Amino acid sequence: MLCQVQKLVEKMYTLLGVVVSVSTQRVEENLYTNLRGQHMALMDRMAKGEVAAFEEAFNAAAPKFVTVTAPNYAALKEAAEKAAKDAALADVGMCSHAVKISMHRMTSSG
């Protein structure tokens, strides 16, 4: 049980790193220190605008969502796995698009 909680906390810190990297808002100092201690290299890549770093973090930490269609129990296992991967790729694509827009706004206004 403790291991699951630790994994969840790690995922939350990873997602917080994504948010902090694209936000102009500041977070509490102790929280930021812990965040930098755990994810300094990843946050440095995100601060440079490296979209692959955002995708990596989002892919590793974002919750995996259920698709909106009912499962086809007659379908092969491979088809179900492909649908799950496609949904995850769509989530990563939306995250990347939002990051690009945010980074563009930050560089345009700065």
Image (cartoon, rainbow, N blue to C red):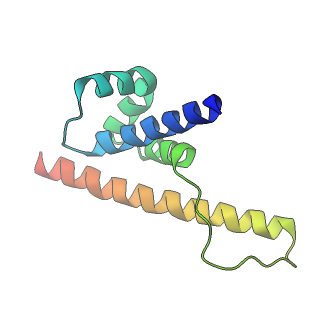
Residue 17 sits in quarter = top left
For the residue pair 87 and 48, the one nearer the viewer reads as 87
- Residue lying at the far left of the rendered structure: 109
Residue 43 sits in quarter = top left
**Looking at the image, residue 89 lies above or below residue 54:** below
Identify the residue shown where x is 56% and y is 30%.
6
Image coordinates of residue 108 in percent, x first then y, are: 15, 52
Image coordinates of residue 72 in percent, x first then y, are: 79, 79
Identify the residue shown where x is 20% and y is 54%.
105
For the residue pair 94 and 36, the one nearer the viewer reads as 36
If the image is split into quadrants, where does the C terminus sit? top left
Q: How many marks?
A: 0
**Looking at the image, residue 43 lies above or below residue 88:** above
Identify the residue shown where x is 40% and y is 24%.
40
Image coordinates of residue 109 in percent, x first then y, are: 12, 51
Q: Is residue 104 left or right of residue 18?
A: left
Residue 31 sits in quarter = top left
Q: Is residue 72 left or right of residue 33?
A: right
Image coordinates of residue 49 in percent, x first then y, are: 34, 42
For the residue pair 86 and 100, the one nearer the viewer reads as 86
For the residue pair 66 and 92, the one nearer the viewer reads as 66
If the image is split into quadrants, where does the N terminus sit? top right
Identify the residue shown where x is 29% and y is 45%.
22
**Looking at the image, residue 43 lies above or below residue 60:** above
